[in-house]
Image: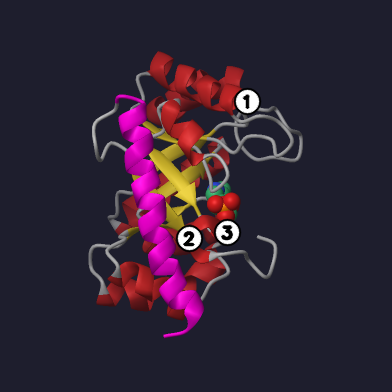
C-alpha cells in the first residue's frame, strides 16, 4: 500500500471520531449523521482501503468518472451506497439510475421527469434529494429557497417522485452557518428528514445545524490534483 492509501484510512478514522463528537456536542444521538466519503478524482486504489476500513457510503460528482470506478467496486462490496452529488444532465440519467443509489442534485422539472421515467424503465427506486441554491448564486445549480416548496410538491404530484430531503453547497466566500440554518428551516417546513450539508471545512458546523449527511472529500483523501 502507498502512503496515500494508508493515510486515507487513518484520516477516515479521525473524521469519524470528529463526527461522533459533533453529534454529542449538538445533543444528537450517536450515529444520526452519515458520512458520505467523496472520492472524486481518486482512483479505486485510493478508495478501496477506505472501504476495507469499514466506510460504505460514498459520493461522486461526475457520472462518467464514476462509471470507470464504481461498477467493479460495487460488485465486490455489495453494501456500498453511492450518492451523486454533482449536477446531472438528462442525457446521463440512464447511466446514473443504473449506478447510483441516491441522487442529491434533483433541481428541475426536466430532470425529475427523466428520472421518474428511467427509474420505472429500470425498475430501480433511487432515493432523491433536492439541491437548494441557498445563496441564490447565478452560476450554481439548485432551486431557489423560495421555490423549493413548489418544486418538491411538483416532484410528488406531477412526477410521482418521493423527495427524501435537501442538499446545499453554501457560497465559498461566506460563513456557511446561515446557509445550513436556512436549509434546515426549509426541511422542517416541508417535513423532510434528510439534510445533506457540510464538507471538509465545515462539517462540524453543519452537524450543529442538523445535517444528517456530511460530504467529506479532502479531509479523508487529501488534496485533489485536479479541480472538481
Ligand atoms: C467535492 C465535493 C465535496 C467534498 O469537498 P471537500 O471540501 O473535499 O470535503 C462535497 N460536496 C460536493 C457537492 C462536492 O462536489
Residue at which label 3 appears = 91
Q: Quadrant of the N terminus?
A: bottom left
Q: Are marks 3 and 1 in contact (CB under 8 Å)?
A: no
Q: Are marks 1 and 2 in contact (CB under 8 Å)?
A: no
Q: Residue 120: x, y in percent?
A: 33, 50
Q: Is mark 1 within 8 Å of ligand 1?
A: no
Rendered view: 184 above or below 54: above
Looking at the image, is mark 3 or mark 1 nearer the viewer? 1
Q: Residue 152: x, y in percent?
A: 45, 26
Give how far apart the Cα atoms at labels 1 and 2 are.
31 Å
Q: Earlier in the sequence, mark 3 or mark 1?
A: 3
* Residue range highlighted in magenta: 1-27
Badge 2: how crowded within 10 Å, few (<14), some, or many (20+)?
Answer: many
Q: Residue 14: x, y in percent?
A: 40, 55
Q: Is residue 158 one of those drawn in magenta?
A: no
Badge 1: how crowded within 10 Å, few (<14), some, or many (20+)?
Answer: some
Residue 220: mark? 2
Looking at the image, is mark 1 or mark 2 nearer the viewer? 2
Q: Is residue 10 left or right of residue 201?
A: left
Colour option used = secondary structure
Secondary element at image label 2? helix
Residue at which label 1 appears = 144
Foreground residue among 173 and 195: 173
Q: Earlier in the sequence, mark 3 or mark 2?
A: 3
Q: Residue 224: x, y in percent?
A: 63, 66
Q: Is mark 2 within 8 Å of ligand 1?
A: yes
Give how far apart the Cα atoms at labels 3 and 2 are.
31 Å
What residue appears at the point 39 percent right and 41 percent down from the top-left corner? 213
Amino acid at each position: 500500500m502507498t502512503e496515500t492509501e494508508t493515510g486515507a484510512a487513518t484520516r477516515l478514522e479521525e473524521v469519524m471520531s470528529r463526527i461522533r463528537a459533533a453529534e454529542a456536542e449538538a445533543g444528537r444521538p450517536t450515529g444520526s449523521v452519515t458520512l458520505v466519503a467523496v472520492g472524486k478524482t481518486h482512483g479505486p486504489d485510493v478508495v478501496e482501503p477506505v472501504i476495507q476500513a469499514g466506510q460504505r457510503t460514498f459520493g461522486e460528482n461526475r457520472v462518467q468518472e464514476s462509471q470507470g470506478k464504481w461498477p467493479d467496486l460495487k460488485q465486490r462490496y455489495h453494501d456500498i451506497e453511492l450518492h451523486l452529488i454533482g449536477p446531472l444532465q438528462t442525457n446521463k440519467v440512464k447511466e446514473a439510475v443504473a449506478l447510483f443509489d441516491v441522487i442529491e442534485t434533483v433541481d428541475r422539472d426536466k430532470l425529475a421527469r427523466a428520472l421518474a421515467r428511467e427509474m420505472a424503465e429500470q425498475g430501480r427506486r433511487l432515493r432523491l434529494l433536492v439541491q437548494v441554491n441557498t445563496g441564490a448564486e447565478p452560476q450554481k445549480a439548485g432551486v431557489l429557497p423560495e421555490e423549493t416548496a413548489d418544486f418538491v410538491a411538483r416532484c410528488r404530484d406531477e412526477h410521482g417522485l418521493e423527495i427524501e430531503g435537501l442538499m446545499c453547497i453554501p457560497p465559498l466566500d461566506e460563513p456557511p452557518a446561515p446557509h445550513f440554518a436556512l436549509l434546515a428551516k426549509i426541511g422542517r417546513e416541508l417535513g423532510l428528514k434528510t439534510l445533506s450539508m457540510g464538507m471538509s471545512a465545515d462539517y462540524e458546523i453543519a452537524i450543529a445545524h442538523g445535517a444528517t449527511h456530511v460530504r467529506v472529500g479532502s479531509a479523508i483523501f487529501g488534496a485533489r490534483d485536479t479541480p472538481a
